[in-house]
Amino acid sequence: MRVDMYPLEWIERLKLGRGGIRPSTPLKVSPVVIGLGFTSLLTDVSSEMVNSLLPVYVVLHLHLSPLQFGIVDGLYNGFAIALFSLFAGFLADRTSRQKEVALCGYGVSAACKLLLLWVGTTYGWLLLVIGLDRLGKGIRAAPRDALISLNTAPEHYASAYSIHRAMDACGSLLGPIIAFLLLAALPGAFDAVWITSFAFAVLGVAALWLFVPRTTRAEPTPVPSPVPRGLLSSRRFLAIAAVGALLALTTISDGFIYLMLQEKSGTAASYFPLFYVMTAAGYMIFSVPAGRLADRSSRSAVFICGYGVLVLLYALLFFSGNISVGTAVACLAMLGLYYAATEGILMALASAVIPAARRTGGIALIATGIGLGKLSSSVIFGALWQGVGLKYSVLIFGAAMGIAVVIAVTLLRATDNES
Amino acid sequence: MKARPVAIFTALTACIAVLLAVYLLHVKRRTEAIQNTPAPTSDLPAAPAHVESPSVHRPDASGAPAEPPPVAAADPAPPAVTDEQRSPQQANLLFFRHMGVDQHYGKVAWTDSGQPQVVNYVDAMACEVVYVSGGHGICLSADRGVFTTYAASLFDARTFAVSATMPLKGIPSRARVSIDGSVAAFTVFVSGHGYTTLDFSTQTLLLNTSTAAVIADLESFTVRRDGKVIESPDFNFWGVTFTPDAKKFYATLSTSQKHFLVRGDIATRSAEVIHENVECPSLSPDATRVAYKKRLMVGNRILWQLQVLDLATGRETALSERRSIDDQLEWLDDAHVLYSVPAAEDGSSPSTDVWVAPADARSAPRMYQRNAYSPASARCKDAEACAAPSRPRVDL
């Protein structure tokens, strides 16, 4: 059997981490995880600065009237990026160069910030730069997550991911605020915003370069083919990948939730960025507690609970009429809690079953499934919205997610004993 | 191993911080220089409008469209009390957003066609988009803070006194006021559905200018195409233009990747599709033609060709403008249209200029007003509404 080719340690550790036996070893966060956290923090400040201002830039500075360039391009790009990140993941494993591949991804995104200065009024070029930026994001995510787990003891995977995600969320919280403050101080000076964003991105790349050592733990086992057949024959891995994709498929994208909250609470739509910032704040605050809880009790339980929170949020959105601003804030906190309990935890679940030599590719595969699930979800939700209206689309998605959660519990339980 | 990376990172951070600070300081100087650009008569008594000596370069009047054709050569001191026969009347005033990179950047400005080189600035009024007609004006403004918010204000075109202000749902795009000044319309871009994607929808509202009440959101209108009602949540309306009686309007309806010209009726809350591939319509003063931008796909790029549609015959005429123009046209008179064009093609300048093109495409477009955006060639039903804004007396 192919699985036998790999050291048994990961299976041993998996066994060890089950059945109530919980590590008593104190949590020691590897400086590598902190380094990666800084990289993500700085990079997110950089990218969210740009993202939060792009609409204003396009309409008020370039005097363009953009409309509906969205969905077709989004699908096409999403698919291309998914394929590319898979390839990058397998390449990273094969050469055992996660750090270099991640650097490449961060570097591309950093360069895009500078390119923004030159694209000018051509909307097509602007979209190209944004696409390139997303590509960089696609390339870097899997090797970065692989580096986190490769530098952490398996019993602390969830904690390590949660610390990284908290720092990441902190960056996406600060980004829009810095951007808006900068523009308030220097009216109309978008070049100042792009340059500042570029400076943060460069620091992010530098943090990765300086604080994260090259992978040594993963022995460069020769991988016969880029397709991880060993992985695909692991039922546990397949279950996790399926669960991730299925739940993503039934998740309503944040934009639609913000829209509903805004309509129900009667707040001005110009506060959309604030909604985003509050979600990030919730994510940041709940991430570490959720991660530690997952390591101590059960990762799959915390993961499922996260989706339970989301189902609850959908129910709230469906049944409530007008809501107060306070309730809206509570809903955003729930959204943050959902992210905290699911995003990094799923990566921890996955990292525990993927052999080190195939970690990046395996994570990329799971992330791709989730990405395609999200993409399809927003298309389906958009179509449903046109058909039955916003309220009943939420009901349908809520019900679908309920079913998906039941399937997820079954799948995760069924493969829990697999060795 | 431990200390060195930290030291390098700290040094690098310091370097970048210094470089960034220098750059930001440079930008700050630049913006301050703009705000402090000396204006010869900026210390005039506190009045809503300032008069400026020529900071505007007008093209030589060698070609017909360069000068507004219907302007009488006489001294226009009390403007627009002549030719009552024409309906609507021409105020001979051009209102616009001043785009010159100086202390008046972003402020409302106006010129009188009798003295086109004299630009009057309304420093109290900063707008992203402005429009004036029938003595009433609408200003869509941006308030930049930790989070930028937007507002629409209705104002009196002679005193610039604001009568009402309402918050906006999105980024200002277009605004129009009917010739009698009774109804205003505006379009904003709402970029909400996907915060991290560049996906936009529009909202277009009609306002009663005297009560400031919202008459309707165009999305609540019943739309018919070939007699059949069409509806879809992906309806996006933009670019309203009113008929002279202010009872009907034309606008663009975008749905399923198509862009229809619709004619709407305010009283019945209904609209019908009358043409395809028309964006940002603008009805001529004589109400016989619609000037608009037509979407063309050239390779992967979207280009907008300016066109005039004859409403009676359905005949389309391409204007002589060869550049791709993304603007709602404004009729200067029955024979000429105005539109804004970025001053630098690469977007390096925040400035735009207003150009004029003949509606019959017989001659080439020309620069009409430098450093201007959102032009409004004011019209009115009665002479009083066409009166020029009050301004300090200047000895010329």
Image: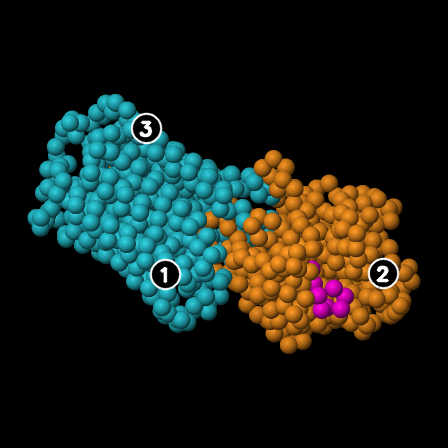
Chain colours: A cyan, B orange
Give the spatial CA distance, label 2 vs label 3: 72 Å
In the rendered structure, the answer to whether residue B127 lies left or right of residue A330 reads right
> Chain ID for label 1?
A
Main secondary structure along the magenta-highlighted residues = loop
Q: Which residues are magenta?
A: B243-250
Position of residue B260 measured from the top left corner of the image (x, y, whole percent): 64, 53
Tag 1: residue type?
Answer: Leu
Q: Are marks 3 and 1 on the same chain?
A: yes
Q: Are marks 2 and 1 on the same chain?
A: no
Give the spatial CA distance, label 2 vs label 1: 64 Å
Q: Are marks 2 and 3 on the same chain?
A: no
* Residue B175 makes an appearance in the image: no
Q: Quadrant of the N terminus of chain A?
A: top left
Asked if the stretch drawn in magenta spans residue B247, the answer is yes
Relative to the observer, which residue lies in front, B2 or B131? B131
Asked if the stretch drawn in magenta spans residue B228, the answer is no
Q: Which residue is mark 2?
A: B114
Q: Which residue is mark 3?
A: A91
Tag 2: residue type?
Answer: Gly
Q: Quadrant of the C terminus of chain A?
A: top left
> Chain ID for label 2?
B
